Structure formats: structure tokens, C-alpha cells
Image (cartoon, rainbow, N blue to C red):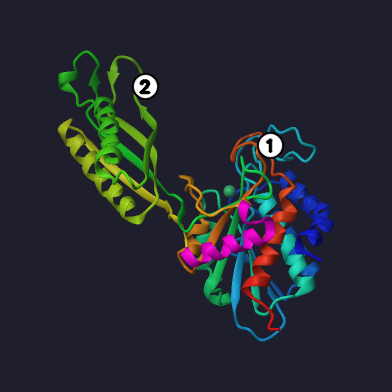
Amino acid sequence: MPIVNRFHDFAEEIAGWRRDFHENPELLYDVHRTAAQVAEKLREFGVDSVETGVGQTGVVAVIKGQGDSDSVIGLRADMDALPIIEKTGKPWSSKVPGKMHACGHDGHTAMLLGAAKYLSETRNFDGTVVVIFQPAEEGGAGAQAMIDDGLISRYGIQRVFGMHNFPGHPVGTFAIRPGPLMAAADRLTITIEGKGGHAARPHLAHDPIVAGAAIITAIQSIVSRNADPLGSAVISVTMFNAGTTDNVIPQTAELRGTVRTLNPEIRDLVEQRLHEVVDQVGSAYGVTAKLLYRRDYPVTQNDEAEAEFAGDIAAKVVGERNVDRNVVPTMGGEDFSFMLNTVPGAFIFAGVGEHVANLHNEMYDFNDELIPVGCSYWATLVETALPRSA
Ligand code: NI
């Protein structure tokens, strides 16, 4: 029976798990209920081993195939939700006020569980599959925490694959590209120390607000004049805090923002230029401006050969004409990038419907029609990457 038909038969059951996760969203590393459910199901499926508490609350299961191949591949899903008040009105809406599965990680977790059940039952492969359920994708670097806890080394993972649902694109389509797929996402905080005073006597003060405004304007030239126009960089200042009233020049100001880049050289360049511009514009305005640049997630960099392999798998599931192998990269960040920096692999986008709300939107709900397609992708990937000898 074709794999996709096999999953159509049990897609309803998997959708039930998905809706249960959706009703009970948990944030960052605090995914105790979700992780416990995942571990319990994996044990029920009869996988070879289940380990919990990897990278605080991650879950890892091993499924061994038939034969004696020592190839090991990792498949990864994320389990955490977002601090958003849900407005979908769905019967399975969040039961936890202020928390919501608005990025579809409920669907990712359910689909990888579905694949694990199939793989554990059929074992139609030769080698070892490690299924990885990580916490804290949304800003907590849960992937890095699992790696630090020995995920890749202890399980001997040689290749690793991830998937994200892709709103705006029909179910039954996939999109991928070799090289950079998603941006490095860094944070900047600029603190400006001036000299406060009377608003009517500015010559006796060092105004941190005027200096801050000049810094914001000067920063714009880094993208337009320093970065290669064929590279990509975004610098957005998103917060400017200063002052308390209308007749006082404040002592300090604070700016915050985000930097997104698609290649490591441009990332280094932007960081270095930010330091120079902030420092020197501050001096020019007679204030002390300090940049704190925090590197968050690196570029999600698909291995060339693995991206082609993942595209081939998608084509097996939905047909070549439904696979975009050269999708435009997105400036969003993704912490699967840490795994891709450790072993070769590929991250793929799976269309979740043209009318599904945007990720991180209060109206977003994962479309369960993706379940048989996503599960088939995982199962086909394993049976192709770890073939049984004839
Ligand atoms: Ni996500």
C-alpha cells in the first residue's frame, strides 16, 4: 500500500493528538505535559528506547530497522507554543489564556509521532532512526540545549532533517532550497548615557534623544551602503525608550531592535559596523552610546546534497511539479539551524493551505489536511535514506 494511503487511514487519530496538543499549549522549556504525552505515545508504539529530559524537556526515541546498517538519521519536531491570546474560536482552542500554538508546532509534533508509529510498526528500513522532539524553538534555543546535552554525539546522528508548515501554500506542495533558507536573527540593545537638564537650556545638557535619533538614521546606511546589495540584511530598530515629561531632557535613552542576515560574512560586517556607527555617532553628539549585540539563531543553512535529497523525497510524495526547489529564503529565524551547523541535513517547508493565517497570528490554526502528507514525507525519507538490501 502506498505510504500516503496508509497515513490517510490513521490521519484522524493523529489529528486527535494534534488537537489535544493545541488545547494544552506550553511555552519554551516548560513543555512538561506535551513531552510526557509524546514519551507515553512513543512507548506505546513499541520504539526501542525513549529518553526524556534531553536539553531540559526534550524527548528522544530510537527506532531500529531490520538489517545491520550502522547509518543513523535524525528527524526533528518542535513542541513549544507562543505567548499569544488565541482568537480562532475552534473547538480545540487553547484552554490556557495567553498561550497558543500559533506556529503549528502542535502539528509538527503530531506528524512526527504519526511517522514514529508507522516506522515502529513496519521497520521497513535498514539502519537507525532517532526521532527528536525539542522544547523552546521560539526564542529559547532548545535545539542547542539538546545538542549540548549530547543529542548528536550520544545517538551518533549522521544526518538530520526538519520540516515547517508553510501558510499561503497549498497542502500537497513543498518548498526548499540548497544553502541559506532562513535568516540569522540577532538582537541589539543600545544604551545612551547623556546629561539630563532643562528642556529650555539644551546647551547645558547632552541630549540622548537627539543622539538616539541620529544613531537610528546612521544605522540605515549599514544596509544601504556597507552590505553587498546582492546579500541580504535587515536592521530594524523597534523600541526607543527615553524621557518622562515635556520639559526635561532625560539622562539616558535605550534603543532595541533586530538584525537579520543570510550569510555569515554579512552578519559579521553588520555587527562590526553597528559597533563603529553607534560608538562614533554617540561621540559626535557628546553622549556615550554602547551597543550590546546578542547573536541568537544562526542562518538555517541547508546542505546542498541533502537539500536535493529532501526535494527528491518531497517529489516522491507529491510529484515533482509540486516541489519548489529554489524557494526565496525568508528572514525569519529557526533554531534547527544549530542542528544543521552540527551535522549535514535539510529543512523543508510544507504547504499548509492558502487560506491559513500567518504564523504567529492569533487566528492561526494548523491545517490537519497536512498530516498524511507530512507523515508520508517522514516515512518516505526514512525508507529511502535507509534502504533495505534486496
Ligand atoms: Ni515555528
| Boundaries of the magenta span | 303-321
Residue designated by label 1: 97
- Specify few, some or many for label 1: CA neighbours under 10 Å numbering under 14, 14-19, or 20 or more: few
Closest to the observer, 341 or 93:
341
- Residue 53 image offset from top left, x and y in percent: 62, 65
Residue 27's disc number: none
- Residue 213 image offset from top left, x and y in percent: 28, 27
Q: Regarding mark 1 in the picture, which secondary structure is present there?
A: loop
Asked if residue 308 is positioned above or below residue 259 in the image, the reply reads: below
Which residue type carries mark 2? Thr
- Residue 62 image offset from top left, x and y in percent: 67, 73
Residue designated by label 2: 244
Quadrant for the C terminus, please. bottom right
Asked if residue 235 is positioned above or below residue 296 in the image, the reply reads: above
Which residue type carries mark 1? Pro
Of pointers 2 and 1, the one earlier in the residue sequence: 1
